[in-house]
Image (spheres, rainbow, N blue to C red):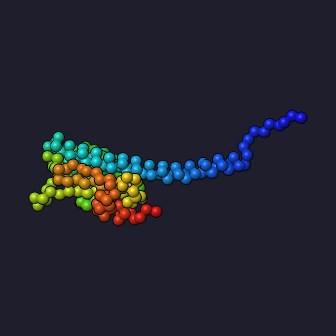
Amino acid sequence: MSKMHQEGVTLIELLVTLSVVSMIIAVGVPALRDFIAMNQMSATVNDLVTSLHVARSEAIKRETSVRLCPSTNWNSLMPTCTPLASLAEGWIVVADPNGDAIVVQRHEPLPGRIQLHRDFIDSIDFLANGRLPRIADAEIEFNLLLCDDRGDHNTGGDIAAGRWINIRGTGRPRIYTKRPDVQTALGGCLAHYGPIQ
């Protein structure tokens, strides 16, 4: 008698394989979501800080004031600053805003999951020397808080999910990433987004 050779997998082998795959997915999907959210936050912060640096350097180079302001028509042929709008809706960098108004740079709205909170009026002006204007002979500073649906979540190493950008009188932006710093800026992300679900 000859033996029959069968090929395939047993039910036990199939169940073990499915359970291993489901464990990998259960661990991998949340990690991938956090990875994507961290990269999106970093890219957004880098874009905003780059625009701040461009505005400051253009003010020095052109020896005139330069403004970074929100613009809801940032992609039009002749974009303008939009009073009472948010930078989250898009922004432009404008040289000589009270004169010829040369648009130096434009940026699209922020990704939908990222919110921007600020403690200043609509725009940030840089003087011809690259500094921020003084009010009543006192230096001013601006604060920008970028948050997403992760709130004040610790992403590891006491690094917050959100970011705080502080611009002091010199006009140089500084990015804060540590949770205690981000939590104190403008009330922290938890105050604006609520607890993480």
Name the residue rendered at 36%, 53% in the picture. Answer: 159
Residue 172 drawn above or below residue 83: above
In this picture, residue 27 sits left or right of residue 16: left
Residue name at image x 28 percent, y 48 percent:
49
Q: Position of residue 108 (x, y in %)?
A: 35, 49
Q: Does 10 sit left or right of 78 as displayed?
A: right
Seen from this angle, which residue lies furthest left?
137
Looking at this view, name the residue that lies furthest to the top. 2
The x, y position of residue 118, in whole percent, is: 28, 59
Q: Is residue 188 visible?
A: yes
Q: Quadrant of the N terminus?
A: top right
28 and 77: which one is in front? 28
Q: Is residue 96 visible?
A: no
Please name whichever residue, 59 or 142, is drawn nearer the observer in this view of the structure.
Answer: 142
Q: Which residue is at 17% across, 47% downward?
A: 130
Q: Is residue 92 placed above or below 179 in the rendered structure?
A: above
Q: As drawn, which residue projects farthest toward the right?
A: 1
In front of the other: 15 or 107: 15
Residue 135, given in percent of the width and then of the height, sits at: 13, 59
